[in-house]
Image (tube, grey):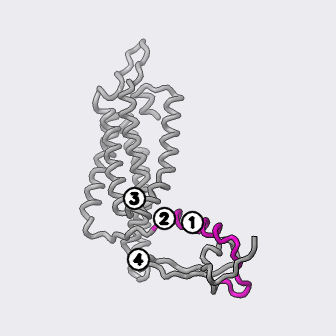
Amino acid sequence: VVYLTAVFHLRSITTATIVNVFNGTTNLAPVLGAFLADTYLGRYATLGLASVASQLGLLIVMLTAAVSRLHPPRCDPGRLCSGPTPGQQAFLLFGFAFLVIGAGGIRPCNLAFGADQFDPRTEDGRKGINSFFNLYYFTFNLAMMISATLIIYVQSNVSWSVGLAIPAVLMFFSCAFFFLGSRTYVKVRPEGSPFSSIAQVLVAAFRKRRLKLPDDHPEESLLDPPHLSSSLISRLSYTNQFRQAQAAASPCSSLNQTAV
């Protein structure tokens, strides 16, 4: 907000609109990123592409502060401040768009990808997962504290270009270390998004809405396919909840079809 008003001389209403749209899309983008990672790309590819997008976004935002042609001139005393040109504002929003893409891929995949590197079926794997989560949240909160104190101090008292260059440089090293370990990672293949599975259940339950489950031990008539070898899925106990949705897992040949 301060950068948009102090450097780009945007009005408060315009600044609030940009910030709200940016925050909203940043929070919604992980839903699409999770779907693409689970269904098509996998977590490693999604993280790699999102990291590059974040790097480009930070670099573009840094350039808007470092290059004088990419932001409006400073305000002269006693004169009205000139706002950004359409090209300057478009370049800034272009950087924000890359940051949204980066957040959409990094947020849903970073913890899951880290957990993929450990086998929860072993004692060492369970300890490794616990250590990973502890270290992740420690570094995450440490980074948030530094960004809220040191980075803001540099931006306010040194220069905006230096304050925006620090995150860009740190993101560059983060991308470099991530790709250097590519050969050592456990890369789980995409096995389908839960959103697709939910949609399939709803469609199948609607198509089989005329089927009737047997009153005695209905779970014995439900289709129980084997899980993929790469999946670590714990089975849930059968319940009588959502019985209509249970028809989705019922082979038609084993059930009696009732009249409409």
Q: Which residue is mark 3?
A: 139
Helix, strand or loop status at disc 2:
loop
Q: Nearer the viewer, mark 4 or mark 3?
A: 4
Horizontally, residue 38 falls left or right of residue 164, namely right
Give the extent of the magenta segment: 192-218
> In the displayed structure, would residue 260 be above or below residue 234?
above
Q: Which residue is mark 2?
A: 193
Residue at mark 2 to residue at mark 4: CA–CA distance = 15 Å
Helix, strand or loop status at disc 4:
loop
Label 3 near label 4: C-beta < 8 Å? no
> What residue is shown at x 63% (from left), y 68% (from top)?
207
Residue at mark 4 to residue at mark 3: CA–CA distance = 29 Å
Q: Nearer the viewer, mark 2 or mark 3?
A: 2
Label 3 near label 2: C-beta < 8 Å? no
Q: Nearer the viewer, mark 1 or mark 4?
A: 1
Residue at mark 1 to residue at mark 2: CA–CA distance = 9 Å
- Percent coordinates x, y for residue 86 in the rendering: 39, 26
